[in-house]
Image (spheres, rainbow, N blue to C red):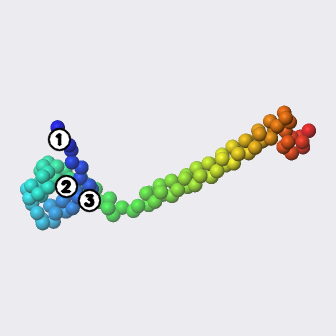
Amino acid sequence: MGKRRNFTPEFKAQVVLQLISGEKTNAELCREHQISTQQLGNWKKQFLENAGSVFENNHHQQEETERVAELERMVGKLTMQLEIAKKASTIYNSAGSRNGRSSCSCERIIR
């Protein structure tokens, strides 16, 4: 069984534009790129179905990008807070384990 070829979206668009513009015929493109007429027909259909989305506003995509950036900042902040808490816990535990007594000033204040 042969390996399937993968075509980039840019290549597909270029081939379909050559077909739509009349630069080359369906048969010429299929021979030149060794693809079936069915494949080229599918690419053309997909291209035409999605042509309207080219002019849509990318507002939704921009909102998603901003939300991802906000969440990444939040994760960074929480990671830093967790690291600080871990270090504080290590320091507190090591201070409390010396001679069974705590040398931490907060324990002295509580007593």
Up the image or down, 35 lies above or below 95; here it is: below
The kind of residue tagged 1 is: Gly
Front position in the image: 109 or 43? 109
Residue for point 77% across, 42% down: 92
Residue that numbered label 1 is attached to: 2
Front position in the image: 86 or 56? 86
Is 104 positioned to the left or the right of 9 in the image? Answer: right
Q: Position of residue 59 (x, y in %)?
A: 44, 60
Is 101 positioned to the left or the right of 65 in the image? Answer: right
Q: Earlier in the sequence, mark 1 or mark 3?
A: 1
Q: Is residue 36 visible?
A: yes
Residue for point 66% across, 47% down: 83
Residue that numbered label 2 is attached to: 44
Up the image or down, 20 lies above or below 104; here it is: below
Residue for point 58% across, 55% down: 73
The kind of residue tagged 2 is: Lys
Q: Earlier in the sequence, mark 3 or mark 2?
A: 3
Q: Secondary structure at mark 1?
A: loop
Q: How busy is the neighbourhood of tag 3: few (under 14 within 10 Å), some, or many (20 plus)?
A: few
Q: Secondary structure at mark 3?
A: helix
Up the image or down, 101 lies above or below 74; here it is: above
Inter-mark Cα distance, 1 to 3:
24 Å
**Which quadrant would the C terminus be assigned to in this image?**
top right
Front position in the image: 84 or 9? 84
Residue that numbered label 3 is attached to: 10
Q: Earlier in the sequence, mark 2 or mark 1?
A: 1
The kind of residue tagged 3 is: Glu
Is 73 positioned to the left or the right of 102 in the image? Answer: left
Q: Position of residue 28 (x, y in %)?
A: 8, 59
Up the image or down, 108 lies above or below 40; here it is: above
Front position in the image: 9 or 93? 93
